[in-house]
Image (spheres, rainbow, N blue to C red):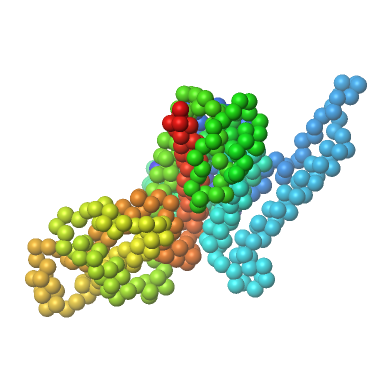
Amino acid sequence: MEKFPISDQNSDVGFPPSSSSMDLNDQSTISETSDQSPASVYSFSYSRTISDASAFSDNSFCTPLAIPARQGTGKYKMTNGDKVDDQDAMDSEMEMMKERFAKLLLGEDMSGSGKGVCTAVTISNAITNLYATVFGQNLKLEPLSPEKTAMWRREMACLVSVCDYIVEFFTESQTLQNGTTIEVLSSRQRSDIYLNLPALQKLDMMLLDILDSFRDTEFWYAEKGSMSSNSNRSRPGSFRRLPMQKEEKWWLPVPCIPSCGLSEKARRHLQNSRECANQIHKAAMAINSTVLAEMEIPQSYIDTLPKSGKASIGDMIYRYMYSADKFSPEHLLDCLQIGSEHDALELADRIEASMYTWRRKACLTYSKSSWELVKDLIAETGKGDKNTILAERAETLLLSLKQRFPELSQTTLDTSKIQYNRDVGQAVLESYSRVLEGLTFNIVAWIEDVLFADRSLRSQE
């Protein structure tokens, strides 16, 4: 792992910016070449901006570049209108950055009385709100507007720049000129941030490139109830009426396919993009699950745990988990016949509460007296500790449930961890991976809608 030594000459506080950082202007070249081939889109060359430049990295904060006007003498001259427009844009961006910075410092408490939330929760909310602002109205498989793309990259670079100064200390040996070996205290970026943040930024770039690849597509969209070829885009020819989407998606625009269907090239591009998005979704879910698992369980959640795991999970599930020699979570989920996402989330909360109840009881066995331990040892001989086995099976059942319902909302424990988390680095990683997970899920759903429309059209033929 790359080390990040302290250099007193480079920084007054002793924490230099990450050596893997680069100027945000380099990222602008990424967006300028977003129409490159799919193979180059998924390359893993991505660098994060340094903290000193990320907060004011947009060109609007720099000295405005004059747009030259051709004069009769052959020289370039900036017009007065360009000066006014550049100054207005710079003032608007500066005011927006001041407002965001103030909210971060005040902990979203505009009264200034110090009753705001902690910094970790503020940054987590800021990333979530930024995602809603940029992608909230994006309901189609199409490129993001240049303004929103620039806004997303600029403000995300600003929000994650705090991670450049979250470090861990370690000792290393140095040899002086006279041959003496000494140990010095050095710093490097914290290991969880060093591993996960660059990965999330690569996934972020790949998702934007997937959206950018859907320019000049063969399909288009029509608003629900307006099934005409010129409802959203003017396309030659006609198309056939397609099966309407499910009623729970009434707000989504309907993808429209030409009467001849999609070409093989377009269909293959959709399928490849879907496979890539599925892999990104798995990676984002894995990072989010890892970060949530490392977060400390709030005491408020522990106080609400039931005294009995059996009472929380129910008699039927408990009997199957306890009596089955070979536990099959998939078979148990099939028997439960979960009908909706709400039922799945309620079951997940009950399983998670039972799991931690059994884990707590397993830990309490070590505090018993010696005679009680002997009795428990005799009773549990040949089958291991009952609470430990039940906790492991509950964890396996919870994982299978989340895999079966990938769109499942956060459980009560996850929400409680995010609410009471005080670690800024974990807050950045959790919120960043969560919004990327949501964006990826939407992209896969949009691709599925288009492919479903194409299959329906071809089946009618």
Q: Is residue 69 above or below residue 105?
A: above
Closer to the camera in the image, 85 or 330: 330
Q: Residue 151 is drawn in which quadrant?
A: top right
Going 67% across and 67% down the picture, which residue do you hit?
110
Percent x, y of residue 237: 61, 25
Percent x, y of residue 234: 66, 31
Q: Is residue 379 above or below residue 153?
A: below
User: Viewed as shown, does residue 259 lie left or right of 100?
Assistant: left
Give the farthest residue toward the right.
72
Number of callouts: 0
Image quadrant where one finds the N terminus: top left
Going 43% across and 51% down the picture, which residue do you hit?
407
Going 77% across and 45% down the picture, which residue do you hit?
89
Is residue 281 visible in the rendered structure shown here? yes
Q: Residue 2 is drawn in which quadrant?
A: top left
Going 9% across and 62% down the picture, which residue do you hit?
382
User: Viewed as shown, does residue 73 lie left or right of 3?
Assistant: right
User: Viewed as shown, does residue 60 lie left or right of 180?
Assistant: right
Percent x, y of residue 405: 38, 52
Percent x, y of residue 64: 77, 39
Q: Residue 176 is drawn in which quadrant?
A: top left
User: Viewed as shown, does residue 144 lie left or right of 335?
Assistant: right
Is residue 290 visible in the rendered structure shown here? no
